[in-house]
Amino acid sequence: METVKLKGGSPIFDKIFKIGVTIAGTYVLAIIVLIVIQLTTNSYQIWAQEGVSFLTGSDWNAVEGSESYGAAPYIAGTFVTAGIAMLIGVPISIGIAMFLSELAPKFLRSVLSFVVELLAAVPSIIYGLWGMFVFRDYIRDWIETPLNSALGNNVILFSGTPFGLDIFTASVVLAIMIIPTIASISREIMIAVPSSQREAAFMLGATKWEVFKMAVIPYSKSGLIGASILGLGRAVGETMAITLLIGNATGQSAFPSSLFAPGQTLSSIIANEFPEAANGSLHMAALIGCGLILFVIAITINIVAQFLVSKVLKTHQGAVLA
Amino acid sequence: MAALESQQVDRMETLTRTPIARSSIEASRYKLVAENIVASYNGIAAVKGVNMKFREKAVTALIGPSGCGKTTFLRCLNRMHELTKGATVTGKVLLDNQDLYSNKEDAIIHRRKIGMVFQKPNPFPTMSIYDNVAAGLKLNGVKDKKIIDQIVQGCLEMVYLWDEVKHDLKKPGMSLSGGQQQRLCIARALAIQPEVLLMDEPASALDPIATQKIEEMITELKKEYTIIIVTHNMQQAVRVSDYTGFMYLGDLVEFGETKQIFENPRNEITAKYVQGQFG
Amino acid sequence: MITIEQRAEFRKHFRNNISRRVATDKIVKGIVFGCVLLAIIPLGSILFEIIRNGVPVLSIDFLTQPPGAVGSNQPGGIGPAIQGTLMLIGLSSLIGVPVGVLGGIFLSEYGNNKYGQTIRFFNDVLAEFPTIVIGLFAFAVIVLSLGYFSILAGMFALSIIMLPIITRTTEESLKLVPVSYREAGYALGIKRSVIIFRILLTSAKSGLITGIMLSVARIAGETAPLIFTILGNEDFFSGFDQPVDALPLRIYRLANLPYDSATAQGWGGALVLILIILSLNIGIRYLFLRKRRGGSFRITTGG
């Protein structure tokens, strides 16, 4: 009886089904378009009021009557924290990926891959909690204070009073958070390098490191850049850990100058000030405007990254010429 | 195809009719000696204790049906097999009486002395033709640009590629045709001045004309190098090799002069295989 | 042609640099292994601190009671937060799972064209989106139009976060179903939709469940979008027009309170949250990921 049932299905139902799944697929696209529309209309007020100076200004005053908003310090803070996180995170991630794809013995490979995945699964808020109550003390006492007392008077980067809740701590925790993303994608990309490439280098008498430099890196370069940019996208949009760790400065003082000073990012100002902003107020429009800026930054980064990564992972055979 | 086959038969006849200069071969010494090589993947033995001696400046062919272990054996000869995950090797490989397996570190030195050409051409895709050939020289610390130029040109000449690419040395290696890429890979292997050349079905991915070029080149290279070639193609073994080893199920069944193996095999399985009854 | 004399001459230019190169190789291997240790230390420390600080707080009351008054000696619990998180997972799945699975079917069965590629691309882009932006979007669409913070807004936001993960895993697991299954169906004259429902989805079931579990693990820890949607609440769920609490949001609030008892409760909440997420992940790993080649599903958490 089952086969008889299976033979059913009218052509009309087939068509309806196709339309149905197409709509479901399109939902994603619709959401992205709606996000653009909603963020734009709900932040329209701030663009009308401040114009370009919302992007370039650094005032942040929510007092009624003298309201003035400029997002420049938070844009800078976003890029600075993400940039430092990349500086720390990318080399470590590539190292981990190299270990997992080229060096680790079989049993370590699967265990460590799992550990890296677990790191990626720890929620942001838990990184924040750990950073605030555990890591902060270590980073302040072991790194920030020594650097500050040795160089603080001469190098503006290390000046200020190390407090542990600042741009540096936020960036380091951010680095820890993006490492699993970059490492696991880089690992996949390195594994996709055909073994014939490695063999060619081994045949010439290369050591493992030389094989890596000669055969693996050139072949996977654009994919590794893509993986790193994907990590950058994560870093830029990261909210909760940063909000808890960056010290939350506003206005002019939020401009990043010293690593050991409090700062602010686009996402952290939104999370911090949202509860204080009244619906329909200019303040709210300013926060949603920050969201729009973040959206533009993130979508640009992500499109570039997806393009690079998918290109590499889909070209299994044949060369990937940059 | 028919024309090609008849051509091959012609060549075979020419080869069998022309007496090989026996005296020179017999006088040559053993360059490479494999003693009791056992190789396995994840505990499953692919090569089960093979002993084989390879004459200097001669071509030795390894033939046998798919999965007989001939490629695995070849890869043991320059310690390439152990790079595969889950692969193990035991036994000795003596190059000029020095055991390749005596010291773990030395694999790097030995691989330089024993060049290898793979089934499919594998030039480095991001490197130019020139850089592909020079890749191994840079590893070995050759800095003199003039010497590098000389070696690159010399090696490309040896593989009959120089005239075809001398104006395009800066072009990527991948821009060449399949046959040219394979010759480029041979040039790359020759550039580090190896003493032995291992070839793993070097022509299996190539068209007949490219194959013919490679075979001519092997005959020429034999004057200088000890060559060991794995091949599926029995006519090819007859055309290019002086000695042939027939492997079956991980064992070396019969090993002797090519003429003897093909015309007068002593083993029953060898006879069946060379007559094309299985494979 | 290179003569024998030339070869001898060439060899003279080869540097005897093996020991230096091998040393470099060893140093690099050491550095690389150091990178791995650097990544493991934080994970170890996080798990250690969560257990050390979280376990003492655990009790039946802690898991079932609402929070006590701020700064008071009655610590209370995280009952409403656990309830809210479970409700959010269930409700988000109501939208996220069907739309995601249908979207995955579209990509796998009808997506072999320009339009399909576009959708696939933007699906991947949405998967990597800052979740705070999705939270703001849900705020603008649901909260502003309804006029109140509620679990509905939270469920909308989290369903958007689930969606691309489920779509992607559905597509990948459908593509792993052998072509012969489809061909057998077509040969019998069965309609495409029926083949998909009766044959393909059944064969791809474990992949689908993996995708759903992955997406649940992901949204369980999401915090940023909840600030703009469910707002947080000290009490248990009291209606679809009321703010609700959720575990990650409660941890955030507790972390921001200047009392040691609040911090301790934050660790307790973190322990419960990480147990939920780890058990989902380990479940996925051992039940399903093994069967899949490559294992490229990425479990990640954002904002």
Image: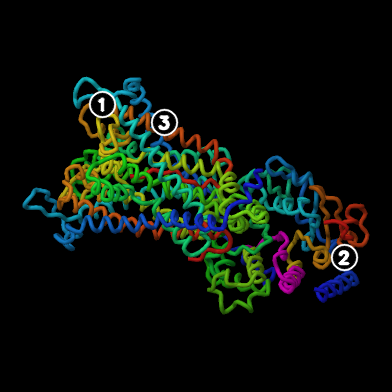
Characterize the local packing of mark 1: few (<14), some (14-19) or many (20 or more) Cα atoms within 10 angstroms.
many
Q: Secondary structure at mark 1?
A: loop
Characterize the local packing of mark 2: few (<14), some (14-19) or many (20 or more) Cα atoms within 10 angstroms.
few
Query: How far apart are the two marked residues, 2 and 1, measured between alpha carbons?
Result: 98 Å
Q: Is residue A150 visible?
A: no
Q: Earlier in the sequence, mark 3 or mark 1?
A: 1
Q: Which residue is mark 1?
A: C67
Image disc number at residue B23: 2
Quadrant where the N terminus of chain A lies?
top right
Residue under disc 3 on the same chain as residue under disc 2 = no
Is A18 drawn above or below residue A138 in the view shown?
Answer: below
Is B92 drawn above or below residue B128 in the view shown?
Answer: above
Q: Nearer the viewer, residue A260 or C271?
A: C271
Amino acid type shown at disc 1:
Pro
Give the number of the mark in front: 3 or 2. 3
Amino acid type shown at disc 3:
Leu
Give the number of the mark in front: 2 or 1. 1
Amino acid type shown at disc 2:
Ser
Q: Which residues are magenta?
A: B192-219
Q: Which residue is mark 3?
A: C275
Is A293 left or right of A63, judged from the image as shown? right
Is A88 drawn above or below residue B276 in the view shown?
Answer: above
- Across and down, in percent, residue B90 comes to 72, 42
